[in-house]
Image: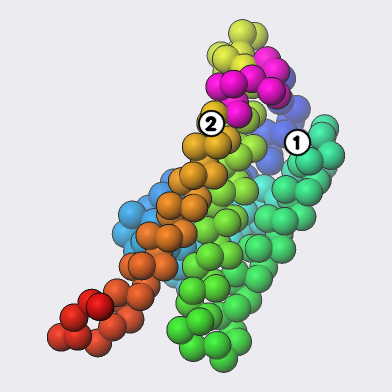
Amino acid sequence: MFGISPLGWVHTLGSLPAIPVAVYMFARHGRIVPRSIPGAIYFVSMLIGALTVLLVAHQSISYGIAAATLLFLLAGYGVGWLPLGRAGVYLETGLLTVTSFLLMVPTVSETLRRVPDGHPIVTDLKSPLLLGAQGALFVLLVVGLVAQVLYLRRKGRPAGIAAQ
């Protein structure tokens, strides 16, 4: 089905939980919270996805996205162990938000190129629909990062101090 190999299904089903878990954490906390149960699920799912893509990828860009995802994921989860104070929270938030972007770019691309089975919506990597979807994801990343920084700044102010 969908031209996916058994190992491809392991990759797809292993990384799939990261999407609803990320949506939940963004909606609930405004960011991915690594030291939580959903954060642990996100980490394991992203790790499975990033590592298994190395076994199923057919395009060189996939290896680059996998390597970047692993780098940002490990850095995002590791930064909390460093004594960086508030800067650490900003860095952690940015790094982990980028991992969700790196998850969604190939997810949207592969979905558009495989669904519906046998007659995909997009057949060309340079399709305006695919490029538009990827562009929309990038805009969402930028807007999301700005919103997260503003949220963290507001959240970090002591009560009773007016915004300037």
Q: Amino acid at mark 1?
A: Leu
Query: Which span of residues is magenta-colored?
Result: 123-131
| Quadrant of image for the N terminus | top right
Residue closest to the far front:
164
Secondary structure beneath label 2: helix
Q: Which residue is mark 1?
A: 7
Q: Which quadrant does the C terminus fall into?
A: bottom left
The structure residue drawn at horizontal position 49% and vertical position 44%, both measured from the top left corner, is 139
Q: Is residue 80 left or right of residue 150?
A: right
Image point 64% across, 37% down: which residue? 106
Marks 2 and 1 in Cβ contact (< 8 Å): no
The residue under the point 30% across, 76% down is 155
Q: Outermost residue, left direction?
A: 160
In the rendered view, would you say 104 is above or below 126? below
Vertical order, 140 against 121 (above or below)? below
Residue 132 percent location from the top left of the image: 54, 29
Q: Which mark is residue 120?
A: none
**Residue that numbered label 2 is attached to:** 133
